[in-house]
Image: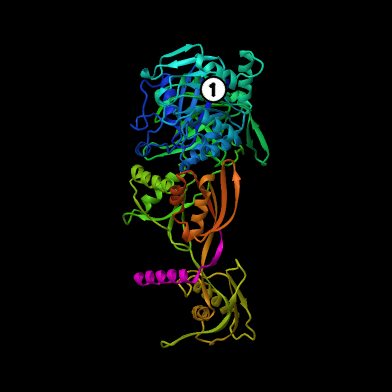
């Protein structure tokens, strides 16, 4: 079967805040297009989109799902994206390969915080957008209030092209403001029966007043201006309906075909060439093959399944391509188009189209596939950094390799997951965007790969330092018959400059310590600094001067001077007014205006120091410095304070001295742990 031409394709991402009904709308459009013969429900776990067991259990989308189908002689690649911020990586990647987005709004809540963030993401990718106000049948649903919130958030270029007939549970149709016709639905047959009629008299005066002021414009001119304005990102039409009842879906599908741009209409995508210069990739099927991989799914049985968009050229099954990102060759086997977890084999995919391929050896999300070996890439996705960290260990001893393999596979499909070993505490750390994010990862490790891990809060990486100078004498002498051991050194320590770690100064004169033994003294001091005298934490920023000592012509050795250096440092540090330092984090918290006071109060209770606030659309951005020990569970608490409407980023700022009463608590706990280990 030949591929679809670029001007006959629509790549559309459904985006919006969690709970707006994107998955239900995705399902309704598949039902309306005749792809499925029954309308699945999120609550029943029967939708095409949310097919993973954990998505069905949690009743939310965790990964992006592609459904490809034909409608009115167009191929539509419809991508249902997660609305939960924990899984935004798939949403951002989907926006990279879409040409337009349908922004789904809850008619009760209107524009929510995450909607604004996703709108900005879609804008940054240059996507055309239309809005679907969903859930009109809910109690307190108000289309006009939702429209007002849209215009307040995104400007007056957000324009209603439909308004509902009736409200809440009495919604029975919509008025098409372009064709100036009323469309009534029979909810009993899931919107399959649509009756077109003149606009009801009770609506006519209101329409004339609100939408038809001024000179009358010809229908053809309205359609032309609307299509051009949507493509150029200057007009954002607002449609409405009830996805769970398939109300308003027919007109929305028509809008996807008639109003949203094809890859051909959108034009060239910008890539980065070998010398870092920008190059334009036209959606030309006669051009060289360039395909961008936007999603990887890790399957324990089928291997990796990579989803991609063909940016240029034609990708054929049973062919060989070059991975420009990893400088590797790949063998393309079967090409697939998707409808959730179901796949259909195709022989080729042309420019602008979206598909999938299994069992590539090297390829991951973010890679670029080419017809021949060449240097080409796309700008990396701007992904949030993980902030919710846990220490972990296998539930069963001996399962370290199984757990490591499972995490490695899941890292391939989730670039916001960070797994590493903390060099200071020695703990294995798994970090995600939220606690839900990490919980989902651990569940998938168990379900897909049979690997179970235990999570616990990570140890705070405290440090130790000194407030004043001190001198000490380290002398190591051991006689056991035959050759003995002898090392002798005098050192002076004092606070060093920030960031220097160990600043070692060799001030030996007259050869009292031979040059060959001085590095051993430094090494002994460096090793002693790994475990300070207060609580066993590493010591930072100390200047150590080696100024005197003695040696024995027979018994002295590098080992003896290393031990002597260690002894001297420990002795000196105890006299140098040692102090415990804690890591301070810079938090950037974005929350709705109505909870700013609660959030600032909570930060103050965590020993935080607010640095300032700045308006960000309808939200407020708060910057504050807070000790790490106080924000290990911040993701959970912020969710509770804001009702899930806030988020934050966190980065290390510096270490600071911990208050005395808290220092004693940390020291006592550390010494108790040491006694247990001993």
Q: How many marks?
A: 1
Q: Position of residue 455 (x, y in %)?
A: 38, 54
Above-or-below relation of 498 to 157? below
Q: Name the residue nearer the viewer: 25 or 470.
A: 25
Residue at position x 47%, y 23% in the image: 347
- Magenta residues, as a range? 652-678
Residue at position x 45%, y 49% in the image: 641
Above-or-below relation of 621 to 81? below
Q: Which residue is mark 1?
A: 9
Q: Name the residue nearer the viewer: 120 or 615.
A: 615
Q: Position of residue 475 (x, y in %)?
A: 50, 85
Task: Give SS at disc 1.
Answer: strand
Q: Residues within 10 Å of mark 1 (few under 14, many from 20)?
A: many
Q: Position of residue 374 (x, y in %)?
A: 61, 37
Asked whether residue 592 appears in the rendered view, the answer is no
Chief SS of the magenta region = helix
Apparent side of residue 174 relative to residue 224 in the rendered image (left or right): left
Say which quarter of the image contains residue 128: top right
Above-or-below relation of 211 to 139? above
Q: Name the residue nearer the viewer: 309 or 483.
A: 309
Q: Position of residue 544 (x, y in %)?
A: 59, 77
Q: Name the residue nearer the viewer: 383 or 490.
A: 383
Q: Which quadrant would the C terminus be assigned to in this image? A: bottom left
Residue at position x 49%, y 38% in the image: 90
Q: How is the image coloured?
A: rainbow
Which residue extends farthest top? 197
Asked whether residue 210 appears in the rendered view, the answer is yes
Q: Is residue 530 magenta?
A: no
Q: Is residue 672 magenta?
A: yes
């Amino acid at each position: 079967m030949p591929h679809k031409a670029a001007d006959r394709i629509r790549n559309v991402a459904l985006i919006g805040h969690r709970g707006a009904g994107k998955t239900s709308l995705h399902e309704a459009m598949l039902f309306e297009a005749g792809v499925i013969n029954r309308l699945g429900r999120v609550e029943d776990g029967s939708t095409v989109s949310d097919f993973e067991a954990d998505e069905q259990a949690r009743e939310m989308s965790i990964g992006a799902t592609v459904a490809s189908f034909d409608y009115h002689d167009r191929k539509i690649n419809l991508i249902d994206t997660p609305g939960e911020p924990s899984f935004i990586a798939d949403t951002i990647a989907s926006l990279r390969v879409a040409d337009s987005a349908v922004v789904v709004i809850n008619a009760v809540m209107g524009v929510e915080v995450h909607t604004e963030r996703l709108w900005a993401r879609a804008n940054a990718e240059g996507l055309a957008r239309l809005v679907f106000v969903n859930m009109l049948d809910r109690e307190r649903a108000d289309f006009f209030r939702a429209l007002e919130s849209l215009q307040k958030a995104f400007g007056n270029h957000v324009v209603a092209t439909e308004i509902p007939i009736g409200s809440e549970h009495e919604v029975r149709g919509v008025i098409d403001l372009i064709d100036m016709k009323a469309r009534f639905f029979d909810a009993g047959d899931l919107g399959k029966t649509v009756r077109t009629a003149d606009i009801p008299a009770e609506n006519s005066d209101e329409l004339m007043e609100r939408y038809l002021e001024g000179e009358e414009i010809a229908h053809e001119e309205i359609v032309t201006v609307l299509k051009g304005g949507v493509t150029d990102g200057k007009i954002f039409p607002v449609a409405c309906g009830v996805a769970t009842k398939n109300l308003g879906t027919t007109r929305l599908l028509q809008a996807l075909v008639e109003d949203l741009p094809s890859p051909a209409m959108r034009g060239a995508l910008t890539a980065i060439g070998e010398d870092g210069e920008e190059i334009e990739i036209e959606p030309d099927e006669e051009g060289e093959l360039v395909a961008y991989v936007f999603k990887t799914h890790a399957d324990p049985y089928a291997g990796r399944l990579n989803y991609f968009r063909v940016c240029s050229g034609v990708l054929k099954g049973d062919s060989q391509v070059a991975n420009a990102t990893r400088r590797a060759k790949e063998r393309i086997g079967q090409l697939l188009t998707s409808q959730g977890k179901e796949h259909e084999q195709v022989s080729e995919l042309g420019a602008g189209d979206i598909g999938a391929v299994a069992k590539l050896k090297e390829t991951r999300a973010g890679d670029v596939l080419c017809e021949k070996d060449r240097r080409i890439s796309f700008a990396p996705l701007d992904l949030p950094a993980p902030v919710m960290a846990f220490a972990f260990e296998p539930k069963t001893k001996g399962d370290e390799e199984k757990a490591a393999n499972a995490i490695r596979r899941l890292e391939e499909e989730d670039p916001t997951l960070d797994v590493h070993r903390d060099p200071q505490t020695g703990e294995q750390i798994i970090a995600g965007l939220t606690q839900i994010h990490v919980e989902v990862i651990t569940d998938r490790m168990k379900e897909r790969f049979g690997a179970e891990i235990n999570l616990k809060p990570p140890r705070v990486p405290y440090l130790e330092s000194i407030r004043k100078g001190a001198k000490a004498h380290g002398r190591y002498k051991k006689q056991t018959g035959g050759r003995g051991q002898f090392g002798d050194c005098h050192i002076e320590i004092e606070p060093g400059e920030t960031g220097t770690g160990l600043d070692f100064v060799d001030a030996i004169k007259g050869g009292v310590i031979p040059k060959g033994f001085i590095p051993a003294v430094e090494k002994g001091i460096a090793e002693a600094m790994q475990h300070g005298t207060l609580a066993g934490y590493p010591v930072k920023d100390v200047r150590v001067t080696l100024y005197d000592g003695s040696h024995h012509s027979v018994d002295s050795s590098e080992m003896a001077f290393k031990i002597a250096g260690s002894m001297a440092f420990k002795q000196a540090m105890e006299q140098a007014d040692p102090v415990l330092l804690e890591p301070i984090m810079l938090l950037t918290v974005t929350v709705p205006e109505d909870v700013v006071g609660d959030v600032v109060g909570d930060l103050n209770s965590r020993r935080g120091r607010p640095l300032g606030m700045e308006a960000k659309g309808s939200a407020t951005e708060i910057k504050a410095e807070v000790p790490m020990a106080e924000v290990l569970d911040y993701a959970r608490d912020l969710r509770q304070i804001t009702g899930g409407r806030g988020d934050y980023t966190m980065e290390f700022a510096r270490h600071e001295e911990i208050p005395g009463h808290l220092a004693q608590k940390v020291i006592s706990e550390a010494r108790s742990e040491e006694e247990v280990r001993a």
